[in-house]
């Protein structure tokens, strides 16, 4: 059972739009907030499209979807988050931006409102610092695409109260998600393992140990992973990998986390992965070759 | 079909007794396959063959063939069927070439393994080849983070399964296949590469020490 009824989502980008779908689908009132109206517009179209497909596939009825959408509002006015029992932020991955947001929300939201952060690399304790309700801030890291992936890494900050963490955990389960508990440590579990692993792969390509296609084949055939690391890096975006490296190296000073020179050269050359049509592999529309 | 002859030089991790790959071998053939932990020592060059294949552990093919000026290479190639500890051998063959390996030999070796139903990844002659080099630091980190309480073993395993689609988490995989085996491989790579990420994690050391003291 969850005591959370109305959920606010800040940031209507890739993650926020997906998280809002998850909350709506679980029967919550949802308020999606972004500073940009056009982003809200895009999220609105994506949401209608997603629910439309769910109806087509017989997963939801039109009546259910009408109910969800009737309880789902979008706004560019932060004051509209005043009625929320829990607010999840999925704004830019920037400490100052997230701290400023929680500070503002602290003045707007009632005392009982819980703040959750979807940060991938920042510290929950640091994000909570100075917001005025450090005991009510939790980490709730969804995976991309949030509307499909069940995993949520949940982390208490140093000042988070046990009771609040439990409340947020119950809310997460009630969403139909599968929470795992991790410490407030850079990258939690998933990215902590993935980012340096992917860097090792890039260094291996750079050192001429094996071609990307051979590495991907080895990983899939030898370990049964669904996707090879080079394919995955192309999907994540090599520019995003650089940002992840910078965030991690800054905190850990671990050589494996530092952006490999080849990664930087590829980004400089505009080889960003799928989105630019070329990364470790070449892409022609959505078809893949060179693999 | 390519014909091949097997020369046994000790116990083989790639093709243990009873493996179908052994049954399909003949008394002679276009390709010679040295199997077992003594394969590099047993290797004899043979230019009359299309290829001579040498099973490798964590050592390099150069131990068998010798090296010089970064220009080494012949019809001799290394290989290993990937396998973690006591786990079943996988369907992957890592095929090891040198800078000047004979392309005809490489193609023939690839064909041989593919005909036998394996996937083949080609790599240069480095200890640990592709997979051991990539996964051992990850396993060491997972063991270290378990000690530090980053998450429980089951939450850690579940995270990579749900979040990354891995069939198994690092802790359950290492316990299933034998932590002491992980110790041996990562220790060997640590000696070669010297970077701390290959240094055996505390839990791997404990498992190894318990084995050594006979418990
Ligand atoms: N993309 C991923 O794979 C992924 C996965 C898990 C977590 N995350 C995390 O989720 C967060 C969002 O990532 P994303 O990929 O969705 O980013 P995004 O750039 O797609 O979306 C961010 C949105 O936040 C809005 N925004 C920025 N500042 C704001 C503010 N002060 N108030 C309201 N809205 C604001 C922007 O207009 C934008 O629409 C980041 O913290 C990121 O680390 C991302």
Image (spheres, coloured by chain):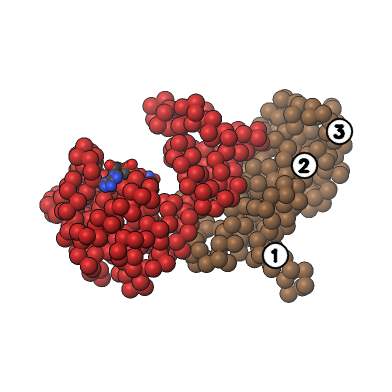
Q: Are marks 3 and 2 in contact (CB under 8 Å)?
A: no
Q: Is residue A228 left or right of residue A274?
A: right
Foreground residue among B147 and B60? B147
Nearer the observer, A203 or B127: A203
Q: Is residue B29 above or below residue B181?
A: above
Q: Is label 3 or label 1 in front? A: 1
Q: Position of residue B181 (x, y in %)?
A: 69, 59
Q: Colour of chain A?
A: red
Confirm whether circles 3 and 1 share one chain: yes
Q: Which residue is mark 3?
A: B45
- Left or right: residue A74 compared with residue B142: left
Q: Please name the residue that numbered disc 2 is placed on.
A: B60
Dot placed on the residue nearer the N-terminal end, 3 or 1: 3
**x, y percentage for residue A146?**
33, 50
Task: Tell me whether marks 3 and 2 sit on the same chain.
Answer: yes
Q: Which chain is brown?
A: B
Q: Which residue is mark 1?
A: B205
Going from the N terminus, do you reach mark 2 or mark 1 first? 2
* Picture quarter with ligand 1: top left
Chain letter of disc 3 in the image:
B
Nearer the camera: disc 2 or disc 1: 1
N-term mark: 3 or 2: 3
């Amino acid at each position: 059972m969850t005591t959370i009824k109305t959920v606010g989502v800040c940031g209507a980008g890739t993650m926020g739009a997906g998280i809002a779908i998850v909350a709506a689908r679980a029967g919550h009132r949802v308020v999606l907030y972004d500073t940009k109206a056009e982003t809200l517009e895009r999220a609105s179209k994506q949401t209608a499209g997603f629910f439309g497909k769910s109806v087509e596939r017989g997963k939801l009825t039109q009546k259910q979807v009408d109910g969800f959408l009737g309880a789902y509002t979008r706004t560019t006015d932060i004051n509209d988050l005043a009625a929320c029992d829990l607010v999840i932020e999925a704004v830019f991955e920037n400490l100052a931006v997230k701290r400023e947001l929680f500070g503002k929300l602290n003045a707007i939201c009632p005392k009982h409102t819980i703040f959750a952060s979807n940060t991938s690399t920042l510290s929950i304790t640091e994000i909570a610092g100075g917001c005025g309700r450090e005991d009510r801030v939790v980490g709730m890291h969804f995976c991309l695409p949030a509307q499909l992936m069940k995993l949520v890494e949940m982390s208490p900050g140093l000042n988070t109260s046990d009771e609040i963490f439990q409340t947020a955990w119950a809310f997460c389960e009630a969403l139909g998600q599968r929470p795992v508990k991790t410490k407030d440590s850079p990258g939690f579990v998933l990215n902590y393992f993935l980012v340096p692993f992917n860097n090792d792969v890039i260094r291996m390509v750079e050192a001429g140990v094996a071609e990307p296609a051979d590495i991907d084949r080895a990983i899939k055939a030898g370990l049964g992973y669904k996707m090879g690391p080079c394919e995955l890096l192309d999907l994540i975006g090599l520019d995003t990998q650089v940002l992840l490296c910078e965030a991690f190296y800054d905190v850990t000073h671990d050589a494996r986390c530092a952006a490999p020179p080849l990664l930087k050269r590829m980004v400089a050359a505009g080889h960003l992965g799928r989105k630019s049509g070329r990364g470790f592999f070449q892409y022609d529309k959505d078809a893949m070759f060179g693999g | 079909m390519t014909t091949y002859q097997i020369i046994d030089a000790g116990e083989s991790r790639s093709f243990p007794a009873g493996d179908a790959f052994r049954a399909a071998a003949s008394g002679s053939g276009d390709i010679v396959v040295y199997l077992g932990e003594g394969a590099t020592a047993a290797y004899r060059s043979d230019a009359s063959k299309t290829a001579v294949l040498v099973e490798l552990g964590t050592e390099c093919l150069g131990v068998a063939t010798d090296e010089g000026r970064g220009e080494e290479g012949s019809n001799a190639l290394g290989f290993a069927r990937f396998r973690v500890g006591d786990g079943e051998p996988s369907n992957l063959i890592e095929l090891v070439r040198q800078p000047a390996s004979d392309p005809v030999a490489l193609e023939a070796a690839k064909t041989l393994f593919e005909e036998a139903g394996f996937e083949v990844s080609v790599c240069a002659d480095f200890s640990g080849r592709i997979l051991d080099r990539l996964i051992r630091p990850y396993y060491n980190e997972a063991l270290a983070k378990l000690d530090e309480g980053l998450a429980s073993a089951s939450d850690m395993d579940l995270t990579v399964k749900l979040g990354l689609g891995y069939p198994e988490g690092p802790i359950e995989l290492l316990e299933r296949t034998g932590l002491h085996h992980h110790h041996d491989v990562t220790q060997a790579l640590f000696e070669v590469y010297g970077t701390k990420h290959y240094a055996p994690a505390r839990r791997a050391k404990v498992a190894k020490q318990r084995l050594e003291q006979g418990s």
